Image (cartoon, grey):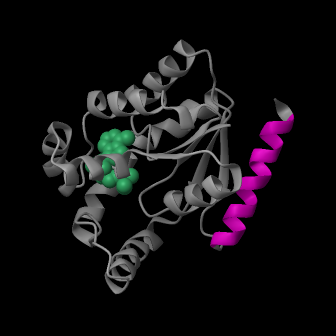
Amino acid sequence: MRLILLGPPGAGKGTQAQRLVEKHGIPQLSTGDMLRAAVQAGTEVGKRAKAVMDAGELVSDAIVNAIVAERIDQADCAKGFILDGYPRTLVQADAVESMLSERGIGLDTVIELVVDDRALVGRIVKRAEDAKAAGQPVRKDDNPAVFEERLREYYKKTAPLTGYYYAKGKLKTVDGMASMDAVTAEIETVLAAAAKAR
Ligand code: AMP
């Protein structure tokens, strides 16, 4: 199963992706996580990405496309994967198409978590508080000022992907404002329908 989770920052993509990993035994490919790991490790990519990420802007398409292309060739992706936070631009969406068709594989479905923007800042603030309380590092971009820029980037560059995937007949929407368990259940219903349609 190859799946894309779409939705603005704070929509719950990461949480739902983790649940899908447990249930379906396929990896979560989060470009945000991969970039943070690169920043942490001080690699060349990390050095180039850090300031852009801290400002809430998008890292270049070339960088993220290269990271994902390399990652999907790893053995654990053979049975499928969940793309979380990627693609985020139309250029990246086209890159996914090429990457998959070059490997003779396709995309099963794209699930958009639909949320109310006004709730998102609150979720981000809570995520930062929860991380702090758990003694985990707090993301530098999880604060209201940077969050606004991340949301702007989302509407400018990522939201058009819903039309892109709708036109391809791949887009399914899920109510991201429901409880976490209800969102998980709705995603599973969508996936079951997609599997039946295959
Ligand atoms: P995330 O953890 O998905 O919220 O991503 C955190 C930050 O990493 C974003 O605000 C961007 O700066 C960068 N990033 C993650 N994924 C991408 C992507 N697909 N394209 C460009 N930048 C990305």
Q: Is residue 182 magenta?
A: yes
Res. 70 in view? yes
Q: Quadrant of residue 3?
A: top right
Q: Quadrant of residue 78?
A: top right
The residue closer to the viewer here, 157 or 85, is 85
Magenta segment's dominant SS is helix
Q: Is residue 27 magenta?
A: no
Note whether 9 is above or below 43 in the view shown: below
Residue sitting at x 74%, y 59%: 186
Classify residue 105 as left or right of residue 10. Answer: right
Q: Quadrant of the N terminus?
A: top right
The residue closer to the viewer here, 78 or 32, is 78
Q: Residue furthest bottom?
A: 133
Residue sitting at x 44%, y 40%: 86
Note whether 97 is above or below 117 in the view shown: above
Residue sitting at x 35%, y 86%: 133
Residue 84 in the image, given as x and y percentages of width and height:
49, 47
Residue 148 in the image, given as x and y percentages of width and height:
29, 62
Residue sitting at x 24%, y 46%: 38
- The number of numbered discs placed on residues in the rendered structure image is 0
Q: Quadrant of the C terminus?
A: top right
Q: Residue furthest right?
A: 196
Q: Residue furthest front?
A: 75
The residue closer to the viewer here, 36 or 186, is 36
Res. 90 in view? no
Residue 94 in the image, given as x and y percentages of width and height:
45, 23
Classify residue 95 as left or right of residue 43. Answer: right
Classify residue 102 as left or right of residue 146. Answer: right
Give the residues drawn in magenta, as a range. Answer: 180-196
Note whether 66 is above or below 146 in the view shown: above
Residue 126 in the image, given as x and y percentages of width and height:
40, 80
